[in-house]
Amino acid sequence: MAGYRKKKLQKARKTKKILNYHKANYDYKFKNKVALITGASKGLGYQIAKSYLKYGSNLMICSSNPNNIKKSYMKLNKIKKKNQKIFYLVADVSSPKQVKKLVNYTIKKFKKIDILVNNAGIYGPKGHIEKINWNEWVKTIKVNLFGSILLCREVMPYFKKINKGKIIQLSGSAARPQALISGYAVSKTGIVRFIENLSEEVKKYNIDINAVSPGALNTNMLKEVLKEGPKKVGMRYYKKALKQKKMGGSSFKTACDLILFLGSKYSDGIKGKLISALWDDWKNWPNYKNILQNSDVYTLRRLTSKDRGFSWGQSPTKSIYDRSLAHYDPYSLRR
């Protein structure tokens, strides 16, 4: 009886420890760190900048809108501590020349970069693919996809040189299709694949690269959807947007907490993942780093009939040669 009670007490203590861990907040210390944050003039980008500033980071912020980024700079400058520095630059991330200038300017001012947050993005045209403005569709790809890739490309030589760095990519809702907003959906899915690919490419370095799905935030993008109306975005998506506006949307703090975590030492070794700020228990991930990095969980993969419990659809046999080419065992993991 005593042994039973002892085991029960040990289990209760273990459960309490796990619950406390989930609720615990990390002690972020970004003093002397430099965070480069794009699209920081408003919305989530501004909140990310504010969060990093709160925990001691120096900031380089940018936006393509001169007036908005100056206003954001002035607001952030009022709440910074004496030992913190903030600089801003007007920059179009889809321009290779301007991206190069942005990164060089950051290194010139701070002598380093520790964290890159690729937040700049646009929704682009909404409607059926044969009816939307093609130039605007291409612009969406250039800003959301090419812009983020250009920034990664530009900071990579420096990160490789110092053998460390953090890249945090905002992905939107890349894990699911978004009919009638195809430019945005395609660009975000593409950048998530690039992030995983780049992470694999630089795996011998201490460079952690991850994508973040922040949740349904009430930003100017929501206003765009409501303004376009159901004819452009579809009745289902429009009703969802109305509900989101009414309920207040997802928490900016929840998204920022994850982005702080990914810029901190606590996330060292976690790389190549697509992480949901709302649905993933990322605070617990440091306990499972080895498992995470040897698995394709939290990545974009093809679902098969077997993954959904169907008995049809898959070839009954595969050669050893075919299986040897798979990145992970196709018979034990989703592809």
Image (tube, rainbow, N blue to C red):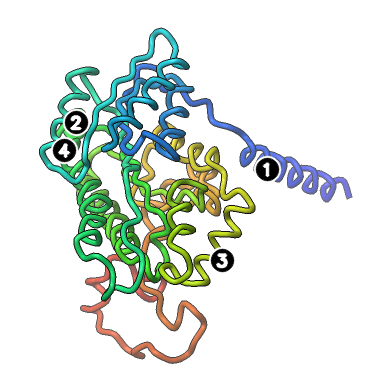
Q: Which quadrant would the C terminus be assigned to in this image?
A: bottom left
Local crowd size for mark 1, using a 10 Å CA cut-off: few (<14), some (14–19), many (≥20): few
Which circle's residue, 1 or 4, is located before the other in the chain? 1
The residue that disc 3 covers is 239
Q: CA distance from mark 2 to mark 4?
A: 9 Å
Which circle's residue, 2 or 1, is located before the other in the chain? 1
Q: Amino acid at mark 4?
A: Glu
Q: Secondary structure at mark 1?
A: helix
- Nearer the viewer's eye, disc 2 or disc 1? 2
The residue that disc 4 covers is 154
* Near-viewer residue (128 or 302): 128
The residue that disc 1 covers is 19
User: Residue 109: horizontal and vertical position, in percent?
Assistant: 21, 17
Q: Quadrant of residue 160?
A: top left
Contact (Cβ within 8 Å) of mark 2 with mark 1: no
Q: Amino acid at mark 1?
A: Leu
Q: CA distance from mark 3 to mark 4?
A: 40 Å
The residue that disc 2 covers is 102
